[in-house]
Amino acid sequence: MKIKDCFILRNIAGINTIISTDSTSSFDGMITLNDTGVFMWNILKNGATKDDLVNAVISEYDIDTETASADIDAFLDKLASVDVFE
Amino acid sequence: MEATGKTVAQAEKYLIPDTQNADITLTYDSDACKKYIDAHPEVPEQSYIYMTLGKRFGEELLNFNGLVLHSSAVEYENNAYLFSADSGTGKSTHTGLWRQCFSDARIINDDKPALRLEDGKFYVYGTPWSGSTPMNINVRVPLKAICFIERAEKNSIERITDNSEIIQLFLTQTLRRVGNDRAERLFELLDTLIRSIPFYKLHCLPDEDAAKLAYEVMSK
């Protein structure tokens, strides 16, 4: 999975904010992420499988595989629903 | 500007004789224009050109530390106050009430004022693009505060402390689909803006008390 190039992420006054900058995504709103979300977003920006993501998260954070996997599923579903992925 | 008709008429007070050294050149695609007019015969060609060039201006301004906010900008005591909301909410009504209450208040731009960061401070500018009315003046005024308005049963105003809410409200009233580079500029500007000026939310009736309340709080 890879995030479309039209998305940018930036911290604006403490808020990690994402928008699509053109119409290659139909999403016209904004997304805010916490630090873990940003961590995962940056991995997906370059392209990654779900397993890559799970491995990265359990290495970086003190969390077990099952919880990571469930959280990641929820995160990916949310992103997919707003036309984030190529 | 090569455009004729409405755009030039609204731009009259901004025209300068030197057209060779423009910082920004605005163009529109005549094929796209023709296609749009054919599909929307109720829209005069001049209106299409006016809107398209206004949008281009907003996009180009991002390369000059500026942006356009969909709002009505009122100037009073050399401070600019921006009232922003979706069309039809009552921005112009509200700033019109400022003029009723404060005789020296002036409308800088009734629809799409420009904001620009210069030497660490934000200024509000009139532009030729002021929506369906020609209410705009060729001035530069320091920005004092920005306020998002909502209709309500009674008047109240509060400072918005949640930056996430400010960002959400702001982004819906400015150009977003401007490409990656310009969007980066937009985000940088918004970051500086949030750190430098206060944002408010006004719940209001279309009456003079609302204008007086807004002034009382925002002018501090």
Image: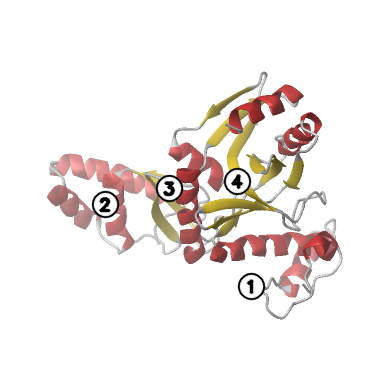
Question: Can you give x and y, in whole percent of width and height, for residue B120 in the image?
Answer: 49, 54
Q: What subunit carries mark 1?
A: B
* Disc 1 element: loop
Q: Which residue does the numbered mark 3 point to in the structure image? A: A81
* Disc 2 element: helix
Q: What subunit carries mark 2?
A: A
Q: CA distance from mark 1 to mark 2?
A: 39 Å
Q: CA distance from mark 4 to mark 2?
A: 36 Å
Q: Is residue B206 left or right of residue B185?
A: right
Q: CA distance from mark 4 to mark 3?
A: 39 Å
Residue B151 visible at all: no
Q: Is residue A82 above or below residue B215?
A: below
Q: Residue furthest bottom?
A: B20
Q: Which residue does the numbered mark 4 point to in the structure image? A: B143
Q: Which mark is residue A39?
A: 2
Residue type at numbered disc 3: Ser
